[in-house]
Amino acid sequence: MTKATTAPGPQHLRALARANEVRLARAELKRRVHEGELDVARVILDTPDEALTMTLADLLTSQRRWGHTRCRKLLQAIPMSEGKAVGTMTERQRHALADALSRQSQDAAATRRRTDALEGALA
């Protein structure tokens, strides 16, 4: 005969504690993305546990200068829903989004270089 084991504490308290852990981990992930310590394309390709149930909109808008409009335009070009959870993306979708993000990043860098060159020429 096997004995039943019980987990310590009521189930709802364990669920609340786990939910709090996930919220804190997501907040840290979003902070690191916002500060530029972590690349969103890398998060999408590697998908840490705390990002599995995050929506694409939540992850993308955690970047500096990214709002709902920029997020929507990028996802419409792929096409993908803003409400899609990162963990439910297929490999093809992950690579398509990561490629689109890197292209957009390269375009932004080129624009900054042109702007800096023009400002230098005018000074």
Image (cartoon, grey):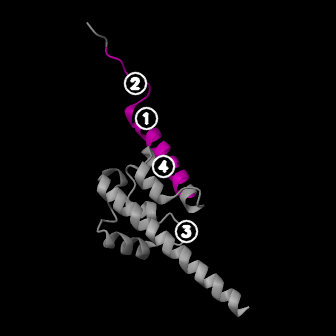
Task: Give the vertical position of 118 relative to 29 (above or below).
Answer: below
Dot 2 or dot 4: first in sequence order is 2
Viewer-nearest residue: 53 or 46: 46
Tags 2 and 4 in contact by the CB under 8 Å rule? no
Disc 2 is placed on an element classified as: loop
Q: Which residue is mark 1?
A: 14
- The alpha-carbon separation of the residues under discs 3 and 4 comes to 20 Å
Disc 4 is placed on an element classified as: helix
Q: Which residue is mark 3?
A: 64
- The alpha-carbon separation of the residues under discs 4 and 1 comes to 14 Å
Around disc 2, counting alpha carbons within 10 Å, would you say few (fewer than 14), some (14 to 19), or many (20 or more)?
A: few
Rendered residue at 30%/65% (across/down)? 81
SS majority, magenta:
helix
- Of circles 3 and 4, the one toward us is 3
Residue 11 falls inside the magenta stretch: yes
Tags 1 and 2 in contact by the CB under 8 Å rule? yes
Percent coordinates x, y for residue 78 in the rendering? 31, 68
Q: Which residue is mark 2?
A: 7
Dot 3 or dot 1: first in sequence order is 1
Q: Amino acid at mark 2?
A: Ala
Question: Start and end of the magenta stretch?
Answer: 4-31
Q: Which residue is mark 4?
A: 23
- The image quadrant that residue 111 belongs to is bottom right
- Of circles 2 and 4, the one toward us is 4
Q: Amino acid at mark 1?
A: Arg
Q: Is residue 89 visible?
A: no
**Image quadrant occupied by the C terminus:** bottom right
**For residue 83, side relative to residue 70 (left or right):** left
Disc 1 is placed on an element classified as: helix
Around disc 1, counting alpha carbons within 10 Å, would you say few (fewer than 14), some (14 to 19), or many (20 or more)?
A: few
Rendered residue at 46%/71% (across/down)? 104
